[in-house]
Image (cartoon, helix red, strand yellow):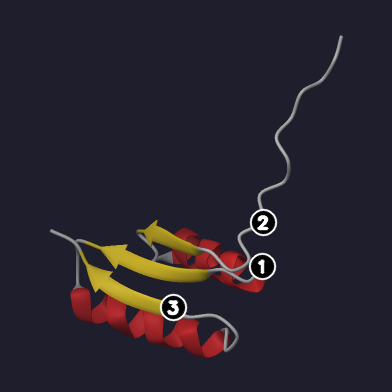
């Protein structure tokens, strides 16, 4: 039986939007995407100040990419 699969996803040079990234699993996902060259928008409907602070920390960890925080409603 033939196996069909998609080519591996390469996030380098792309922009990802991660919701819930102000917490543990989401922040880990942002770090992984940045490590592969993606820029990331951290989005949440909760505490906008906390989201901005988390995005700032993550952005500082990944100087070759960009991480920004924004609120959703």
Q: Quadrant of residue 40?
A: bottom left
The front one of 51 and 63 is 63
* Residue 71 in view (yes/no): yes
Hey, which residue is sitting farthest top in the picture? 1
How far across and how far down the image is residue 22, in percent? Answer: 36, 69
* Residue 22 in view (yes/no): no
The residue tagged with tag 2: helix, strand or loop?
A: loop
Badge 3: how crowded within 10 Å, few (<14), some, or many (20+)?
many
Tell me which residue sits at (74%, 29%) in the image: 5
Disc 2 and disc 1 in contact, CB within 8 angstroms? yes
The front one of 8 and 52 is 8
Report the side of 71 relative to 12 (left or right): left
- Numbered mark located on residue 36 in the image: 1
How far across and how far down the image is residue 72, in percent? Answer: 19, 61
Query: Closer to the camera: disc 2 or disc 1?
Result: 2
Report the side of 10 relative to 72 (left or right): right
How far across and how far down the image is residue 52, in percent? Answer: 29, 81
Q: CA distance from mark 2 to mark 3?
A: 18 Å
- Numbered mark located on residue 53 in the image: none
Pointer 2 or 1: first along the chain: 2
Task: State the residue position of label 2.
Answer: 10
Hey, which residue is sitting farthest left in the picture? 73
How far across and how far down the image is residue 63, in percent? Answer: 57, 89
Task: State the residue position of label 3.
Answer: 67
Pointer 1 or 3: first along the chain: 1
């Amino acid at each position: 039986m033939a196996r069909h699969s998609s080519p591996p996803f390469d996030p380098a040079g792309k922009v990802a939007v991660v919701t819930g990234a102000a917490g543990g699993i989401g922040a880990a996902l942002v770090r992984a995407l940045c490590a592969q060259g993606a820029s990331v928008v951290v989005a949440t409907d909760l505490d906008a100040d906390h989201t901005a602070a988390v995005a700032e920390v993550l952005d500082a960890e990944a100087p070759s990419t960009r991480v920004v925080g924004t609120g959703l409603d």
